[in-house]
Image (spheres, rainbow, N blue to C red):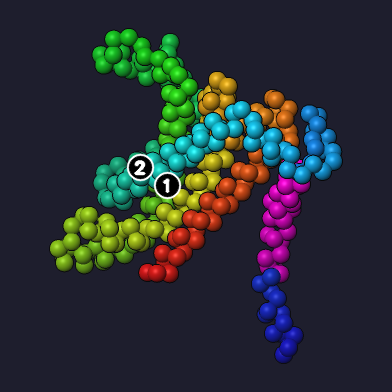
Amino acid sequence: MSTGLNRTKWEPYLWLLPSTLLVSVFVLFPILIVFKLSFSEISQAGVVGKFIGFDNYVEALKLPAFKTVMMNTLWWVLSVVILSTVLGFIIALVLNQKFRGRKIAHAILVFPWATSLVIQASVWNYIIKYEYGNLNNVLLNLGIIKQAINFRSSYQVEFIWECWVGIFVTVPFVTFCVLSGLQSIDVSLYEAATMDGAGFWHKLRHITLPLVKPSLTVSTVLNIIYVFNSFPIVYTMTKGAPAHKTDTMITYLYMLSFYERKKGPATALSVIGFLILCLCAGIYMVTVMRKEDQQ
């Protein structure tokens, strides 16, 4: 009898053991290695030397482009996450309605999300070309403009285009997350609210938003992580030029490590980025959990 109880007690842990080992080997162990490297002297050839404490972190914080890159990263994450969430939510509300061609609209929406980010960035690079870009050709043919516009006239404008491409490829993910939440809502709730005289905004506020909140929470947290770590868009469109003014933290630490050969500070920056993500995710989840407990 006791053997059966012990087996029941330990069986869930045995089932979790393979995935735990995989996570430990491919996630936790590399994280620990990076933490160790950030406190070590690393040569330009990548040879790990002696323990040097926080010297890599101090050098990283003193880099000339550090403040610019951090501000770029902040604006990059905020603009892409917030705007893609708002647009994705609106599109999800539209696609949740019954209309002719809804399946085609679903298929079209998948394309930006399913396509490689490198391809997306390359296509948008071509679209906004000054000499022969499609955007200028369309505007000229429609008679909206009389001469071609330089859509990459400054690094600020180029950074805005990077953000736009980030929003463009992120909206489908948010849309489908929200759409899954909308489709799980019982239609009878809306019918009862309509019978009570509730309008669109009342139903949106008191039925849709509260019930879709779990889906929005998941999409927002994952978006913060994905967007923060997004490398292909920025690197493909500008490579951080000029002088790292369009870089985000991920592309900057890559350039720092493999182009400028400053592997110590680059490792320290990767740890800083990891801690920032952990902090943001932790604060967001705690806030959401407290609100749910209060409700």
Q: Are marks 1 and 2 in contact (CB under 8 Å)?
A: yes
Q: Position of residue 74 (x, y in %)?
A: 49, 39
Q: Is residue 163 above or below residue 38?
A: above
Q: Residue at x 36, y 14 (%)?
A: 149
Query: Mark 1 Cα within 10 Å, few/some/many (few <14, many 20+)?
Result: many
Q: Residue at x 66, y 72 (%)?
A: 12
- Say whether residue 92 is left or right of residue 203: right
Residue with the most extreme bottom position: 1
Q: Amino acid at mark 1?
A: Val
Q: Which mark is residue 174?
A: 1
Was residue 114 drawn as part of the magenta stretch in this picture? no
Q: Position of residue 233 (x, y in %)?
A: 53, 31
Classify residue 13 by image quadrant. bottom right
If you read the primary sequence from the N terminus, does the residue marked by circle 1 or circle 2 appear first?
A: 2
Instruction: Name the residue nearer the viewer: 185 or 37.
Output: 37
Q: Which residues are magenta?
A: 14-38
Mark 1: which secondary structure? helix
Q: Position of residue 80 (x, y in %)?
A: 44, 39
Instruction: Name the residue nearer the viewer: 253 or 171.
Output: 253
Is any atom of residue 170 visible in this view? no
Q: Amino acid at mark 2?
A: Leu
Classify residue 112 by image quadrant. top left
Q: Which mark is residue 186?
A: none
On the rendered image, what quadrant is the C terminus found in?
bottom left
Circle 2 residue: 87
